[in-house]
Image (cartoon, rainbow, N blue to C red):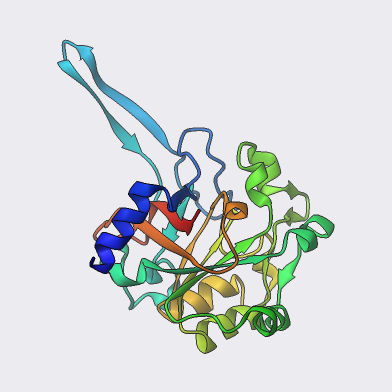
Amino acid sequence: MSPVQAVLAALASGAVEVVDLTAPLSAETPTLVLPEPFSNLIDFSLEEVSAYNDPGPYWKHHNIHTGEHIGTHIDAPIHWISGREGKDVSQLEPARLMGPAVVLDFTKETEADPDFLVDVAHLLAWQEEYGAFPANAWLLFRTGWDQYGHDQQAFLNLDENGSHTPGFTAECAQWMAQELEISGIGVETVGIDAGNAAALNPPFPVHNFLLGADKYGITSLKNLAKLPVYGAMIVVAPLPIVGGTGAPARVMALIQK
């Protein structure tokens, strides 16, 4: 039996289970809100073209209207000024969109402090306990934030001082970009940086360092609690938009049941 046949047999028998890590995409999907004078993307919407009627008697179809970075989506290098000479979303290598998934759980820290920032020391301590991160891995950061995915206000956690959602220190972002042989990271929040990352140095350090180093980010993940710490395989399937800085993505994990 070939390796591919073994995977197919495991899926057929139920020994391997597929877990959907994607948030449903609709007009109610929580989206990033940038303050003035910055411009925001349009929210997702469907425009009916036909519905078993005169414009299309046997079919139903829609036009979709959406920004690239809405819902569960991937950030490509050209999304950020540090990666402006890098790849668009259509150029991301398929081999790097599949790989080992490593789940790091920071739910307790985030429950105590929604502005919690993962630092280098946290990742080193994690590796001391579980081992080195495998090459081509995706580091998935579980914070429990997917519980707010149905509520724009709770998901963004906005007040007069900005958005309060967890993320990473600038030092951690630089370390992940420069020291780890990973494909990218995934988070449960609206963006790969913390809600108040504009105040860090440099601003939005995960975007700056990660995308500038030809690594990728996926956001608005859910169901990370269903994955093991090690041993899952992730599949990230964005729309291959030519020139696109990002795209909505279906993200799935294969786990041993």
Compared with 171, 19 (above or below) is above
**Residue 111 visible in the picture:** yes
Residue 217 place in picture, x, y as percent: 48, 66
Q: Which residue is drawn at 51% across and 68% down?
A: 231
Residue at the extreme bottom of the image, as rendered: 179
Compared with 194, 70 (above or below) is above
Q: Residue at x 57, y 84 (%)?
A: 132
Compared with 221, 150 (above or below) is above
Please tell me in which quadrant of the rendered image residue 63 appears.
top left
Residue 219 place in picture, x, y as percent: 52, 57
Residue 41 place in picture, x, y as percent: 46, 47
Using residue 65 as the reference point, say whether residue 243 is left or right of it: left
Using residue 94 as the reference point, say whether residue 149 is left or right of it: right
Please tell me in which quadrant of the rendered image residue 114 appears.
bottom right
Residue at the extreme top of the image, as rendered: 54
Using residue 156 as the reference point, say whether residue 96 is left or right of it: left
Count the numbered circles shown: 0
Q: Nearer the viewer, residue 186 or 248?
A: 186
